[in-house]
Amino acid sequence: MSTFEGLKTDGEAAWRNYMGDTKPLLQVGMGSCGVAAGAEEALAVLRREVTARNIPATVSITGCNGMCFAEPLVMVTREGRTVTYGEMTPERIPALVEEVLVRGGVWAEAALGVSGEEEWQGIRPLAETEFFRLQERRLMARCGVIDPENIEHNIALGGYAALHKALSGMTPETVIQEMNQSGLAGRGGANFPCGRKWDFLRQAKATPKYMICNADEGDPGAFVNRILLESDPHLVIEGILIGAYATGAEAAYIYLREEYPLAARRLRIALEQARARGLVGDNILGLGFKCNLELVVGAGSYVCGEETGLISSIQDSRGMPRIRPPFPAQAGVFGKPTNVNNVETYANAPLIIAHGGQWYASMGTERARGTKMFSISGHIVRTGVVEVPLGTPLRRIFEEAGGGVGNGRPLKAIQSGGPLSGFLTARHLDLPLEPQAFAPEGVLMGSGGLVFVDEGACLVDMVLRYLTFAQDESCARCTTCRIGTQRYVDILERITQGKGRPQDLDTFRWLEGVMRNGNCAHGQASPTAVISTLRHFPEEYEAHIREKCCPAGVCPLPAASPALTR
Amino acid sequence: MAKVTLTIDQKTVEAEPGDPLLEVAKKAGVYIPHLCYMDDLPSYGGCRLCAVEIEGVRGLPLACTTQVTDGMVVRTDTAPVRELQRGVMETILSEHPDRCLTCHRKIHCLPNWICLRDDVVTDRCVTCAKNQWCELQQVSEFLGMEGTGRFYEEGRSWYGAREEIPLERENPFIERDYNKCILCARCVRVCDEVRGVGAISVTYKGDKARIDTPFGIPLHETNCELCGACVDVCPTASLMDKTTKWAGLPDKLVSTICPYCGTGCQLLLHVKGERIVRVSADAEGAVNKGQACVKGRYGLDFVHHPERLTTPLIRDNGAFREASWDEALDLVASRLGDYRGEEFAAIASSKCTNEDCYILQKFARVVMGSNNVDHCARL
Ligand SMILES: Cc1cc2nc3c(=O)[nH]c(=O)nc-3n(C[C@H](O)[C@H](O)[C@H](O)COP(=O)(O)O)c2cc1C
Ligand code: FES
């Protein structure tokens, strides 16, 4: 049985050796985003070049640091400074090797920035770049820094210290106290206070109790959980274990969506390494705490992200959200008390335990504490993942981190929070990123996806796509959801074909009222995309229905009203 | 546990705490429209019809998933409740051949008439085998769905270009027509939770969701026992007895005991004129509680077989002649007198009850002095 001190010493030694003060270290960013951009080939070419030329250098991998727009990334560390190079496609790797390894300098044109706070060899610090300067990296501190397949790196940079602190010096109650004090709210979309939820489970009488990590991340446009799981899986595992300790859960599951094969691989490796070191299992860190952690991979259904649907799926049942009561804290997986939290919610726990609830609460706003990761995509210059204090204006994310639309067209809409949420307009750019600010606009902030849409898009067409998704993913329990979404699709389809009728808009509102009566949030909230656009973009519907035209020219209709062009 | 007292539409009702409100209301004679709830089974909450108003509870909660508590004040017949129920029903009907249900002239039509007002004569209630004993129809009538039709011509709804689902009629007893299915999942639940068979399930999701067997194979190739429990609970014409689908409504129902085995299941014979047109399991039956097996349900057609024996036959000079029971039994008794002990053996039929079998062995041992007693079920 290894003690934490032993693990820490081993980890630090391994990390020092890895960073090597004699040999340069080259890490290829191997998140799914990197792999999609050719990181695997880039890595192969890099290995080949280094071996063929017999260059003394360590070639390794890392996760994604959020700069998905510049993938594949290669991080080159020398003399303790790490320079990040962007767009290192296989073709450009030989040039990189030539510049930084053979000549021993830097490749200034391809460099995105350097680690640390000062300029180095003419390269500015990454932290000062537009993409980074508004960020506050806590959850993502190790993303794109460590090799995510190596537990020692995580431990060397502070991993599992919070777990050790909780197990060796805190009672479950004090852990929950810290969580309550931090003000951390669930990051999966519902924004429920995490500490209170843990307390429900702690107070449940039946045993065994279960901890479940919701890694289903089904919202199109959201990929914050994936970045964490692929880049620093141990942070999430540590958070789950802290939660299990606080609530008295003996077993935990990570429910991962099937569409994340790389995250599954990283989690399997991470769990194996954690088990081998006594960080997961019967007597964790020799401190008498038992928690077994298992990975369950889903089969591809959006509603399996809904906590009771997820529980059914873990039990090998049809992934159908259940009827409440009973709530999961009373009877969840296998009929036993269960707590479900999002990946990012758990990932916050080690930070809170390590630094204290008060420290955590000092970041963010009065009503929304801490930092939050956002995945930004759509019509922007820089697609990627950022971590910012809650309350950061949407505009800073769009203009600074995202770099604006960049194609000359103005911004038209912002879709946050996925298909159960709605659309905001460019007028809303000054909203602070906190759930409470979004709600009055009829939109959810959601789990972290922000999709920016420029004037080239037709919102009726987009809403049709969202409703088609909602329709396709209805679990078919509630008639209102299963059939209601179909009717939305029918009518929207008709509108995009120029066959809309003025009373369709009434039908939309009426049907929303019927669907509110559904069992889970999927059925209740699917109409939000329609209702929010009726509110914020009425002119789009008017154009399609009354003028029979599609101003954006997306639908098979004339771009301007036939009446006007006549 | 102590009973709770609640008020439903001004009626004071006593109930066990935790009972589903829908069931409590039903027992108190208050009808709450529903299409997915089944007595004594966990609520499914799928049809979303059973909304009610409860004082102090937000929105319109479902009666089937609400457990009664002391002092609850429930109203089932308010304008918001009915408006929502009609809205839900309108949504359900948009996926069902619904012209009759929403036709303002439907009171003029008699069973099996051909619609005079419309050219589409198939797929309407008057040509549906379930006409007048269909739960969906009853709920439509209760809620007054005539004249509604918001989704009348929508693309995927029934009158649009919806693809017809082929009927499954490969087994001799149960016919499945999912064009009429509203996915209440009663069949799935009765098969799984009551029969313990689980031959069918809700498959796929969204608009492709369908009740089906594994991989869509015919019912009789699954572990289905063809007990027909699913047919009994289907609120539409999706699941019907194949042989008697078109037999129409019975004149009367006759409760009887199944002749097949010693279990003694209570059956309801649906009798029309002199014929049994359908057999269902009697919910009042103490031993079977509304369940039957394939034999009792689908095997009683022998009753009307021309070659069925209706009196005992006695062989006289190599030829059978009809006889009365008294004559036949007297003959047996007189002839048995010639045998004793090892010469005699008794074999009982598995159609006999335990009591009958007991009497037979007693007779064999005490009267005939033989231990040669056996039963056909042992073979
Ligand atoms: C249709 C639907 C899909 C959902 N998908 C997810 C998901 O992919 N990931 C997630 O964390 N929560 C998802 N949720 C929210 C969960 O039900 C639940 O609120 C969440 O996991 C709780 O974790 P938190 O308190 O940490 O946010 C979904 C909810 C619904 C209704
Ligand atoms: S009976 Fe309550 S939802 Fe169907």
Image: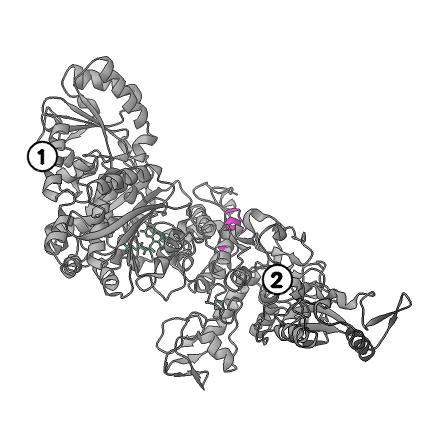
Question: Is the residue marked 1 within 8 Å of ligand 1, measured from its CB?
Answer: no
Query: Where is residue A408 drawn, in percent x and y?
Result: 32, 35
Would you say residue A498 sits in the magenta stretch? Answer: yes
Nearer to us in this view, B88 or A29: A29
Amino acid type, residue under disc 2 in the picture: Cys
Residue A534 in sight: yes
Residue type, numbered disc 1:
Glu
- Label 2: state its secondary structure: loop
Number of numbered discs visible in the structure rendering: 2
Q: Position of residue B20 (x, y in %)?
A: 44, 74
Out of A40 and A36, give the one closest to the viewer: A40
**B370 vs A8, nearest the viewer:** B370
Residue position for label 1 = A117
The residue range painted magenta reads A488-501
> Percent from the top left, x then y, of residue B63?
45, 73
The residue at 13%/21% (across/down) is: A23
Q: Chain of mark 2?
A: B
In the image, residue B214 above or below residue A59: below
Relative to the observer, which residue lies in front, A289 or A421?
A289
State whether discs 2 and 1 lie on one chain. no
| Dot 2 and dot 1 residues touching (CB under 8 Å) | no
Query: Is residue B173 toward the left or the right of residue A256 in the image?
Result: right
* Residue that sits furthest to the top in the current view: A53
Cα separation, mark 2 vs mark 1, equals 76 Å
Q: Percent from the top left, x then y, of residue B177?
A: 63, 56
Is the N terminus of chain A in the top left, top right, bottom left or bottom right quadrant?
A: top left
Q: Which residue is mark 2?
A: B227
Q: Considering the numbered disc 1 on the image, is that residue within a helix, a strand or a loop?
A: loop
Instruction: Tell me the chief SS of the magenta region.
Output: helix
